Image (tube, helix red, strand yellow):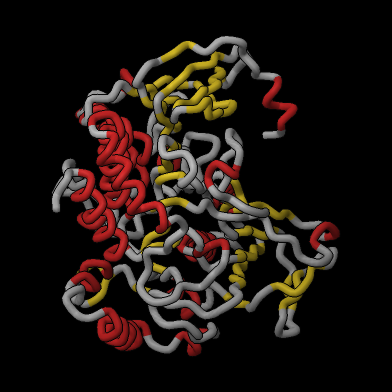
Amino acid sequence: MSEGQFDAYSVDAAYDRGEAVCVIGAGMAGLLAVKNLREQGFTVDCYERETAVGGSWNWRHDRSPVYSSTHLVSSRTHTEFPDFPMPDDWPDYPHHSQVLAYLERYTDHFGLREHIWFGSEIARIEPTGEGRWDVIVKPVSGNAARRLRYSAVVIANGHNWDPRMPSYKGQEEFRGEIVHSSAYKDPSKVRGRKVLVVGAGNSGCDIAGEIAVNAEKCWHSTRRGYWFIPKYMFGRPGDQTMARLSWLPFGLRQKVSEFAIRRVVGDPRRFGLKRPEHALFASHPIVNSHLLHHIGHGAITPKPDIEYFTEDAVHFTDGTSVKPQTVVMATGYRTTFDFCDPALLGMQGADAAPSLIGHMFASKTPTLAVAGLLQADGGIFPLVHWQTVAIAKWLRLRQSDPEAARQFWAKVSPDAGRRYVHGKLNDSPRHRLEISYEVYLKALGRMIEELDGVK
């Protein structure tokens, strides 16, 4: 949002909400923030632009990236919240409708709805000094803005809603249809068509697999080689099998896991794919059991990176070309906070990721926090639970023991921008939010102990 647009929502006087905390978004991260802040005794106002909870998991929402066949890529027991388990009779990998039902049950179980203002959009947030914030809220359907003052703000608006569209030479000349994967909801619009899917993230591979059995022809373009972790290894969900090796030193576990995957999956070059040039866990792994199946059955034809477009064709770096009617760009999302100055979150330059303390706290404004801004090699729900516990405890400590809060902040501040990973991860927009599940979980545990005064 530009500065000129900000001016349209200017309001003279702020209504002071005292020590209340503002939470932006009622998706998974926002619901966790409301619940854990309430448990620390805070009054909470949560603002959600949609008319229901669920965020990206509610596929009826305009910004949801979910498509009809979406399932979890982490298993149920590695995804559920620590204090609210998923039903035991649910499948290992629940459907998106079950995940939404789970979030709705969580909302009702902890009585969160009464703290959520639905149909309310944040126009901007402004620091006012002494750690307080003015939050300008307007209804999605109008411009009647209100200015409210809060003791803190927790941003939980998600990061999978602002599509990143690549630009290739000649793309504007292409006469076929080009859409981002965020606009893909079901295979009905590609049935009987020739389709090229671009991108090898988990969504790209899942969508390619679904299109493969509905389209006349499906090609899948990827830039590099990837590790494919099957959803089941040795009769159990893949993440559960990997977790059984957690007692090993990371380097040895990495080698054992690579050996196991090679034995189970085989050499990707047999399927016309590149062999990964990086070690396992040095790039976000692809959890998928269908892509190689469909390649092996001729339903998907692998292609390398795109070199350029012409009016009726897409040309690849290996000199080959295809003539798709539809191109689906599964090329990820930008990290966007259009309601605040990017500098508040340490964002520098285009397509930059925030530089936060512990992937949560804005280093220059201790009462501004972000929840859920993570890409993990495991289930993200438990991590965001402990994130929001830490955020709530920090905000409470600032009020109850300012000196202890000052000491804590002095200790953690030098870690702004730290990456909680094993070894070295690829440095690309896709990986700047990446964390290693175990490394980050341990760091959160230490932070919470320090906030609790544990020596």
The residue closer to the viewer here, 223 or 25, is 25
Where residue 443 appears, as percent x and y from the top left, is 28, 59
Q: Is residue 104 visible?
A: no
Quarter of the image where one finds residue 330: bottom right
The residue closer to the viewer here, 262 or 279, is 279
Relative to 15, say whether 207 is above or below: below
Where residue 5 appears, as percent x and y from the top left, is 71, 27
Number of numbered discs overlaid on the protein picture: 0
Quarter of the image where one finds residue 76: bottom left
The residue closer to the viewer here, 23 or 211, is 23
Where residue 59 appears, as percent x and y from the top left, is 46, 39
**In the figure, is residue 351 to the left or right of 355?**
right
**In the figure, is residue 415 to the left or right of 351?**
left
**In the figure, is residue 176 to the left or right of 333?**
right
Outermost residue toward the front in this view: 403
Q: Is residue 96 visible?
A: yes
Q: Quadrant of the N terminus?
A: top right
Where residue 112 appears, as percent x and y from the top left, is 28, 25
Relative to 63, say whether 190 is above or below: below
Q: Residue at image x 85%, y 63%?
A: 311
Q: Residue at image x 39%, y 37%?
A: 27
Q: Residue at image x 18%, y 41%?
A: 84
